Image: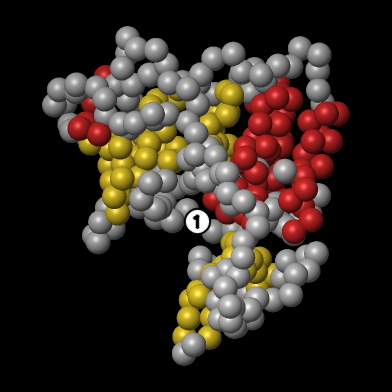
Amino acid sequence: MSQGHRSGHRHRGRGETSPPPSRERTLVLPGEELPGQGLKPGAGTYRVGGKVYASVLGLLAPKPPFLTVIPLSGRYIPKAGDTVIGVVTDCQTTFWLLDIAAPRWAPLHVTGSPWKVEVGETDQYLRVGDAVVVRVESLEATGRIGVTMLGDGLGKLEGGTIVSVSPARIPRVVGRNGSMVGSITAHTGAEIAVGQNGRIWVGGSPEAIHRTREALRMIDEQGQHRGLTARVESYLTSTDRAGDRGPERAPIESAHRDAIPHELPPLPDVSPDEADGAGPDDSAEY
């Protein structure tokens, strides 16, 4: 989940056309034929007989050479490499079963943890209800989702609370180059870990958690509208207190019990178009 650093300008090749720019993106319905002759079907689209159609309800977002649709909502569909927040739902002799907000639960095998776990001792390391940051490692044809807790920024989350938003809103939560989540932490002093599955761990004082939760609610409910950053900033500024400051410690317990705790996991990749989910002129806010 590294921060995005991609340029907001892309050049179209010859023969490629796209819908004319507008200040408002076009809302499209599943099955609706999309404009953009010469562009290939991208995320949120499919092609039949040479024509491209929307597969989800969302905002039309041409990204030459692809034609994409940014979904307004929807369940998390895991992809290899995603960093997600899971909740332990069961402890078996050699693995933990995680709910990662996907269509199927994901088993975390003891070999995917940094602990030396003896058979039958899994509940001494993670218990039902514990939250963890893991990475999706594999997707099998059977539907099994393989995850691992080996890697930088992965581990057990201590305390705090989990706030859920639509996975489609995660680029807006992060903002361009981490601007939105950075603004929230600067104003509230909360600690935040963002999962690409729509789960966001928030730690800190009750006041910090409450204000962060409200800011995330605004993003979840108004993510498709222009001017979102200004509204969130206005809310945070109006509720600022003199004692608010940034996080002092990392929220993730080290997977090795005697080691130094990890830093916050890196933020997910966010393209300028995704961070700017409502319209082109919203990009100035990031």
What amino acid is labelled 1 in the image? Arg
Q: Residue at x 35, y 45 (%)?
A: 136
- Indicate left or right for 110 with 154 as reference: left
Nearest the eye: 116 or 16: 16
Q: Position of residue 70 (x, y in %)?
A: 60, 62
Q: Position of residue 191 (x, y in %)?
A: 59, 24
The residue at the far top in this view is 258
| Colouring | secondary structure
**Does residue 245 appear in the picture of this structure?**
yes
Q: Position of residue 128 (x, y in %)?
A: 36, 30
- Indicate left or right for 171 with 281 as reference: left
Which secondary structure lies at badge 1?
Answer: loop
- Indicate left or right for 128 with 56 as reference: left
The residue at the far bottom in this view is 49
Q: Residue at x 61, y 65 (%)?
A: 11
Reading the image, the residue beneath label 1 is 75
